Image (spheres, rainbow, N blue to C red):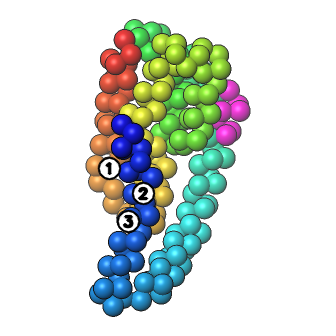
Amino acid sequence: MQFLVYISAFIIPIVMFYIILHGVVNKVSVYDVFIEGAKDGLKTVVGIVPTLIGLMVAVGVLRASGFLDFVAGLLSGVTDMINLPAPVVPVILVRMFSSSAATGLVLDIFKNYGPDSHIGQLVSIMMSCTETIFYTMSVYFMTVKVTKTRWTLAGALVATLAGIVASICLVS
C-alpha cells in the first residue's frame, strides 16, 4: 500500500513531463499551445458562469425556503415503504442540480444523525453513486453547443435511480 502512496505523489509531474517531452520531440511550441489552451479555458469559464450562478441561486432558494423539507414530508409515505429515510429525499433532489449544495445537506445529516449511522452511510454511498445531472448537461452541452440531447436526460435519470437503489441495497 505504501508503494501506491509513493507512486501517486509522482504521477502528475511525470505526466506533465511526458507531455512537454512529447511536444519538444515533435517540434511543437509547447508554451504557445499551453497559452492557447488557457485562453480557450477562460472563454469556457466565462461562458458557463451565468449557468453556474443560476443553478446556485435556485438551489439556495429551494433550500432556504423549506421547500425541500416540504417535499420530503409529502413523499415520506412512499419513502418509508422502500426503506428510504425522509431526510435523504432533499439530498437526492438537490444532488441532481448541485453537488456542493448536496454536500451541505449531507453535512447537516452528519451533524444530526452521525456519519456512521444508517442514514449517514446511505447518503455517503448515494453521493458517490449519483451525478449532478442538470448541472452537467447544462454546462457541457452549452459549452459545445449541443441542442438535441436525445436520450441523455432519460439515461441520466435511470442511472441516478440505479445509484439510489444500489445505495439502499448496500446499506440495508
* Residue lying at 30% horizontally and 85% vertically, measured from the top left: 25
The residue type indicated by label 1 comes to Thr
Q: Is residue 36 visible?
A: no
Residue closer to the observer: 110 or 82? 110
Q: Answer with the quarter of the image where residue 33 lies.
A: bottom left
* Residue lying at 48% horizontally and 84% vertically, measured from the top left: 31
Q: Position of residue 80 (x, y in %)?
A: 45, 9
Whether 26 is drawn above or below 5: the answer is below
Residue under label 1, please give it: 152
* Residue lying at 62% horizontally and 52% vertically, measured from the top left: 54
Residue under label 2, please give it: 10
Q: Are marks 2 and 1 in contact (CB under 8 Å)?
A: no
Residue under label 3, please give it: 15
Whether 55 is drawn above or below 64: the answer is below
Quadrant in which the C terminus appears: top left
Mark toward the viewer: 2 or 3: 2
Separation (CA) of disc 2 from disc 3:
9 Å
Tell which circle, 3 or 1, labels the residue nearer the N-terminal end.
Answer: 3
Residue closer to the observer: 15 or 139? 15
Which stretch is magenta? 60-66
Whether 6 is drawn above or below 43: the answer is above
